[in-house]
Image (cartoon, grey):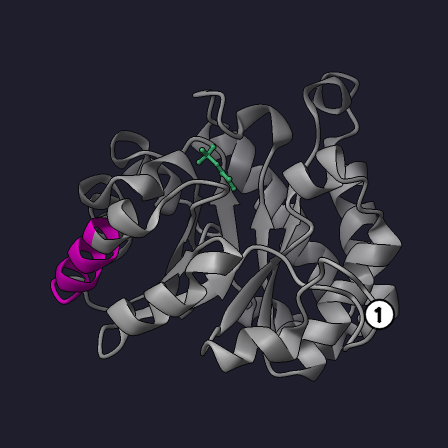
Amino acid sequence: MRRRFVAGNWKMHGSLASNQRLLKDVAVGAAKVSGVDMAVFVPFPYLSQAQTLLAGSSVSLGAQNVCEFHQGAYTGEVSAQMLQDFACHYVLVGHSERRAFFGESDAQIAGKFCVAVSCGLQPIICVGETLAQRESGQTESIVSAQLDAIIQRAGIAAFESATIAYEPVWAIGTGKTASPAQAQRVHEAIRAQLASFDSDLSERVKILYGGSVKPENSAELFSMPDIDGGLIGGASLVADDFLAICLEASR
Ligand code: PEP
């Protein structure tokens, strides 16, 4: 039985003042949620604040990106070891906004995944198709190729300490959600892909759904057999909404 996982991706939102309230509310509310792993992925400058305000709570901390190199002359980058200084447990890798707006390639994303795993950070590798790709019937081949780039570079065993997030690009921040059946089909295909390498491991890997998850649609999505929780963007900026989604995951 896989334990559910709900992760909040704050994206480039927040301020010291607004985070103070949000982090406190999430930390306090998390005490009422049992049996679910919870994490928030805050912008780099707020890692220290989040580390302090989440200390002693059941909410883990994650970063939204990591450099594919360990250290050196890489101006503007942040290494996996630096993230560990702030007690980061997780890191997002290959979010579609990084792929689309910052040109991250499958190879670069695989490098980030490997660095994270080698430093003891758990990557959440994001995969998903655009609307055009879905409409031309390429959903499964696109998702499979994105995942394969990681498996070929990191090896299947690396997924023992990784999570996968299926995030259809057309559903992120748009208010459009994949139907539970649409999402389940892709999650099932992802698990089958993992199983073709290692069937026991495929049953242990968590596959989250992301794309306009809200309190109102989370129960139905989480009822699908291969959906193990959610990667939540917009709704994670409102403590009550994020906590309501976490509570749905606990049922
Ligand atoms: C995301 O940023 O990963 C995401 C799923 O965003 P939203 O929930 O706002 O669609």
Kindly identify the residue that appears in the image at 70 percent across and 32 percent down: 129
Q: Position of residue 95 (x, y in %)?
A: 64, 46
Q: Which residue is mark 1?
A: 73
Q: Position of residue 63 (x, y in %)?
A: 53, 61
User: Is residue 28 magenta-colored?
Assistant: yes
Q: Position of residue 9 (x, y in %)?
A: 45, 48
Amino acid at pointer 1: Ala
User: Is residue 186 magenta-colored?
Assistant: no
Kindly identify the residue that appears in the image at 62 percent across and 41 percent down: 186
Q: Nearer the viewer, residue 33 or 191?
A: 33
On the rendered image, what quadrant is the C terminus found in?
Answer: bottom left
**Residue 36 in sight:** yes
Q: Nearer the viewer, residue 189 or 235?
A: 235
- Left-right relation of 180 to 202: left
Q: Position of residue 219 (x, y in %)?
A: 28, 40
Q: Is residue 25 above or below residue 18?
A: below
Task: State the predominant SS element of the stretch in magenta.
Answer: helix
Q: Which residues are magenta?
A: 21-32
Location of residue 101 (image quadrant): top right
**Residue 196 in sight:** no
How packed is label 1: few (under 14 Cα within 10 Å), some, or many (20 or more)?
Answer: few
Q: Is residue 3 above or below residue 231?
A: below
- Left-right relation of 65 to 232: right
Q: Nearer the viewer, residue 180 or 115?
A: 115
